[in-house]
Structure formats: structure tokens, C-alpha cells
Amino acid sequence: MQFEEPTEKKPVGIIMGDTREILMDLPSDTFQCCVTSPPYWGVRDYGITGQIGAEPLLPDYIADLVAVFREVRRVLKPGGTFWLNIGNTYTSGGRTWRQSDAKNKGRAMSYRPDTPEGLKKKDLIGVAWMVAMGCQLDGWYLRNDIIWHKPNCQPESVRDRLTVSHEYLFFMTKSEKYDFNQEAIKEQTADGTGWKNKRTVWNINTEPFSEAHFAVFPRELVRPCILAGSNPGDLILDPFFGSGTVGEVATDLGRRTVGIEMKPDYVEIAERRTRTAKQASLQLSVEEAKMPKKREPHMQIFAVS
Ligand SMILES: C[S@@+](CC[C@H](N)C(=O)[O-])C[C@H]1O[C@@H](n2cnc3c(N)ncnc32)[C@H](O)[C@@H]1O
């Protein structure tokens, strides 16, 4: 495959295919930042051969993702950052399929993976942390586990445990020293008079997206990652592009994006969505214009402390 970098005029390039193969064709040290949300293990059936997330065995799923993210590390620039959104799952409790739910058709599953060896019916599988630790052992610097708290989470019909209302966003880096714009994502202090370093619990509502029958991640989850991890004009990567949320936010913020997606229907949705991203950019710049001018425009280099 001949890799062509997106340009200012055409800021989003979508490559259709298996991310495991496509990534191998991308040149090393190319992207400034990667933001992605892979399929979760045994949660959704994307109905496509070769999909990640449908591995019958948990160790195979973890190995698949760690291998994908190893390639992501190779194609990131030395100062690059990686933001991985992933959630935990529960063992199937012996059920072999999952019913569709009215709000979310993509949750129907024609299969459920077996309970992993060593775990029991009803066990929470800490798969998000398993993947994060797999990545860490593989060479990534794990810098933060951010809790994405969803105030509007889906109700669950459970009576013997709490309703899960969070997922993780793991912040990782390729190198010990990396490019990180702390100023760009500072939060206001409680009394509204000053600014403080962004905290690790982010309250963000899920965002419905009518065109896709699966959970897209909210733009507000992606935005701080891109602001902290890149400058305008930089190249952003999403190896599981889905409906193209990363492309839309990155375009709004003046960055260029490469998205990889296997399912043709989603590529079509993402193409449509990212083509119209410019309009949102006008709204964002109005919003940004209202913000205090104290933020520094350039990234700083921080060493791991
Ligand atoms: C959780 S969704 C990503 C959603 C995306 N963040 C959004 O906001 O729309 C995961 C995506 O990975 C895709 N996918 C699964 N296995 C893949 C593979 N081997 N190569 C490329 N894409 C794959 C699925 O089709 C799905 O669109």
C-alpha cells in the first residue's frame, strides 16, 4: 500500500481493511498522537470476518490488541502520545448469546465467549487493565488511568451489584520524554478564579449517534486527548475508526487524521461525517474565543516523574 499523508485541504484519510495488516504498511515515526477505542471483548458483534473482540479466548484478545498497539507505537513519533478508551466486561455466566436491546441493536450477540479459565460465573473481568498492563509490559509508558464517568449511563437490570457507570481512558507514551500540552486542558478551579491541572476523573455524557448501531465515543472525550497530545497541523491516528469521531474532532481542531476501519458501512458513515466536520469547527472557534487568553499555544516537553 502506498501511504499518502492527508493534507490541509483533505485533512482526513480513511483506509479500509484489517488494522493488523494496514498498520504494518504505515511508515515509522509518523503520527503525533493516537486516540482510539477498540472493540471490547465479547460485547458487540460487528458482523465482519476478522473483527477484533470476537476471539473465543481472552488471552487471544489481549494478545491481538497488544500486537496492534505495538505497531501503533512504531508509527508514533518519539514524542507521541496514545489515548486508549476501553471498558471491562463480565463473564457470560453460561449464556451463549445476548439479546438485542431496544436502545442499542449492536449489543445483540450470536455467541458469547466462554468464562475464561480461573474465573467464575458473574465475575467482573478486569480486561481493560489486562490490556493496559499488556501494553506496559510490551514497552509503553503508562502515565494515567483516567476514569470516564458517564452521568447518563445505561440502566442495567441487575439486582445484586452496582450499575457500571465508567470506562477507562489509558494515557500512554512511546518515550520517557514526550510532547504534552498541559496548559491546553487545564480545568477551572472550584471558585472559578483560576486554573488547575486536569484531574483523572472526567464526567462526560455518552453521545447518541443516529447513523451507527454501536456506541461511538463522545467528542468531549476525544477533544482533551488531541489538545494535550498535538498541535494544529499534526497527524492523528485512530486504528479503529468506526464512525470517525476522532476524525471529526481532529478536523475541528485543525489537525489531520488517518483512520483505519474494516467495515465498509462504517467507512461510508465516517467519510460523510468527516466531510462535514468544518461547520462544527466554526462553532468551536466561537466557543474557544470566549475562553481566557492565558493558555500557552505551544507544547512543552515533560519528563516522566
Ligand atoms: C468501538 S468501535 C469504534 C467506534 C469509534 N470510536 C467511533 O466513535 O465511532 C470499534 C471499531 O473497530 C472496528 N474493527 C473491529 N475489528 C477490526 C479490525 N481487525 N480492523 C479494523 N477495524 C476493526 C469495528 O468495525 C468498529 O467500527
Image: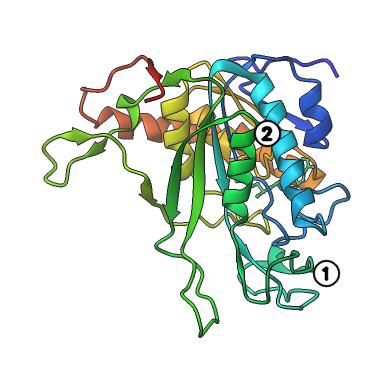
Kindly report which numbered mark, 2 or 1, lies closer to the viewer in this rendering: 2
Residue 94 in view, yes or no = yes
Q: Residue at x 69, y 66 (%)?
A: 107
Q: Which residue is mark 1?
A: 110
**Residue 55, above or below 137:** below
Dot 2: few (<14), some (14–19), or many (≥20) neighbours within 10 Å? Answer: many
Q: Amino acid at mark 2?
A: Phe
> How far separated are the C-alphas under marks 2 and 1?
28 Å
Residue 173 placement (x, y as % from top left): 53, 27
Q: Which residue is mark 2?
A: 69
Q: Residue at x 75, y 43 (%)?
A: 63
SS of the residue under disc 2: helix
Within the image, what quadrant is residue 212 found in? bottom right
Indicate left or right for 213 with 148 as reference: right
Q: Residue furthest right?
A: 49
Q: Nearer the viewer, residue 57 or 286?
A: 57
Residue 231 in view, yes or no = no
Indicate left or right for 68 with 49 as reference: left
Residue 300 placement (x, y as % from top left): 36, 15
Dot 1: few (<14), some (14–19), or many (≥20) neighbours within 10 Å? Answer: few
